[in-house]
Image (cartoon, rainbow, N blue to C red):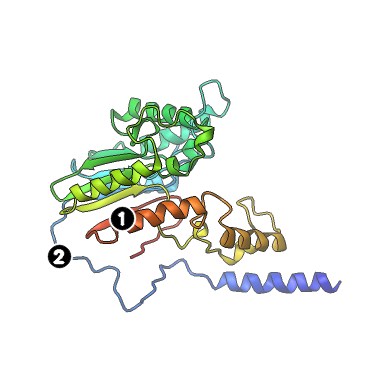
């Protein structure tokens, strides 16, 4: 009976804490005004959409609907829209005989449909979920599907390769990285680099260093699925509710949920978490390469939150 009462008390306290949460933006330094922009002409506008791979049958998710409505009166031919990976949930684009193919196509079609009012450049990049349908084979299926619908070079990097650099303008360079390529277990994908000039992780960093030198007088935008820094769950930051409901199914497991959160925070067990050894290796090298570079911006998906980190 005592343990039951203790459980009720803990539950009530947790609900009180959660009820104090806010949906308004929170800033590290409230003195700074985040809405003050520099008085300069806009060269390019980038619309960034992360993890858009789940929509209702025949329709668009709320986020895609808002995007579609917004750009109807805003976009120009010089704008860019970048889908930052995880374009299909839960596991990429299976082959045509698979019973899950229809749902996967529906999720891609929703994103394609959201672009009907957009007149600029479109790019899809891979996320970890896009690799989950037979690895490289599933990724190439998705690439073909997107390019059949939107035109050549709309899925980058191509052929499961890790890197693509694009001259956006005289002042902007866009460098696209397939971060899941780096995180993948290559033993499970023995043909992963067959169509790529970059065949090792060491060469990958050499190429990035070269691209940065070529773009040293530009603003360089790195687009990649996995974030370099994050204050979300992949960075070990958990809301109080995660200590009761560890999964999206909302099944209460209070003690085990806290244990799972602690393990993910401290151990980096999942390759998809920021402090996993390989993930950390990738981001640490990228940070080092860009440390002395001016005007570098990283844009990412992966976390289902909006974050702006300097």
Distance from label 2 to label 1 (Cα)? 30 Å
Quadrant housing residue 239: bottom right
Residue 64: percent from left, percent from top: 39, 44
Crowding at mark 1 (Cα within 10 Å: few <14, some 14-19, many 20+): some
- Residue placed farthest to the top in the image? 97
- Quick one: quadrant of the C terminus? bottom left
Viewer-proximal residue, 208 or 271? 208
Q: Is residue 107 left or right of residue 35?
A: right
Viewer-proximal residue, 132 or 67? 132
Residue to which mark 2 is pinned? 39
Name the element at disc 2. loop
Quadrant housing residue 116: top left
Residue 296: percent from left, percent from top: 26, 57
Viewer-proximal residue, 49 or 166? 166
Can the viewer see residue 72 in this picture? no
Taking the spot 19% from the left edge, 44% from the top edge, the residue there is: 168
Can the viewer see residue 285 in this picture? yes
Taking the spot 56% from the left edge, 24% from the top edge, the residue there is: 98
- Residue placed farthest to the right in the image? 1
- Quick one: quadrant of the N terminus? bottom right
Residue to which mark 1 is pinned? 289
Number of numbered discs overlaid on the protein picture:
2
Residue 102: percent from left, percent from top: 51, 28
Residue 160: percent from left, percent from top: 40, 33
Q: Is residue 144 left or right of residue 17?
A: left
Q: Is residue 7 left or right of residue 130?
A: right
Crowding at mark 2 (Cα within 10 Å: few <14, some 14-19, many 20+): few
Q: Looking at the picture, does residue 103 appear above or below residue 289?
A: above
Upstream in the sequence, badge 2 or badge 1? 2
């Amino acid at each position: 009976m005592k343990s039951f009462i203790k459980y009720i008390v803990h539950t009530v306290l947790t609900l009180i804490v959660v009820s104090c949460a806010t949906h308004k933006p929170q800033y590290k330094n409230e003195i700074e005004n985040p809405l003050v922009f520099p008085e300069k002409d806009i060269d390019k506008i980038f619309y960034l959409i992360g993890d858009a791979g789940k929509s209702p049958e025949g329709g668009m998710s709320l986020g895609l609907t808002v995007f579609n409505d917004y750009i109807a009166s805003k976009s120009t031919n010089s704008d860019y829209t970048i889908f930052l990976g995880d374009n299909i949930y839960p596991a990429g684009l299976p082959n045509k005989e698979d019973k899950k193919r229809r749902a996967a196509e529906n999720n891609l079609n929703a994103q394609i449909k959201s672009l009907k009012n957009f007149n600029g450049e479109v790019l899809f990049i891979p996320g970890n979920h896009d690799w989950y349908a037979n690895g490289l084979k599933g990724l190439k299926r998705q690439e073909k599907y997107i390019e059949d619908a939107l035109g050549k070079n709309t899925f980058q990097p191509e052929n499961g390769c890790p890197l693509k650099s694009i001259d956006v303008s005289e002042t902007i360079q866009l460098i696209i990285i397939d971060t899941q390529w780096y995180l993948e277990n290559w033993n499970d994908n023995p043909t992963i680099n067959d169509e790529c000039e970059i065949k090792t992780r060491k060469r990958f960093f050499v190429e990035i260093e070269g691209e940065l030198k070529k773009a040293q007088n530009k603003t360089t935008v790195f687009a990649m699925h996995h974030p370099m820094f994050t204050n979300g769950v992949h960075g070990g930051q958990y809301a109080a509710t995660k200590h009761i409901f560890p999964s999206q199914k909302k099944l209460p497991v209070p003690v085990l949920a806290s244990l799972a959160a602690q393990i993910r925070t401290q151990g980096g067990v999942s390759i998809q978490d920021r402090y996993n050894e390989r993930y950390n290796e990738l981001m640490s090298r990228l940070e080092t390469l860009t440390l002395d570079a001016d005007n570098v911006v990283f844009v990412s998906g992966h976390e289902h939150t909006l974050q702006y980190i300097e």
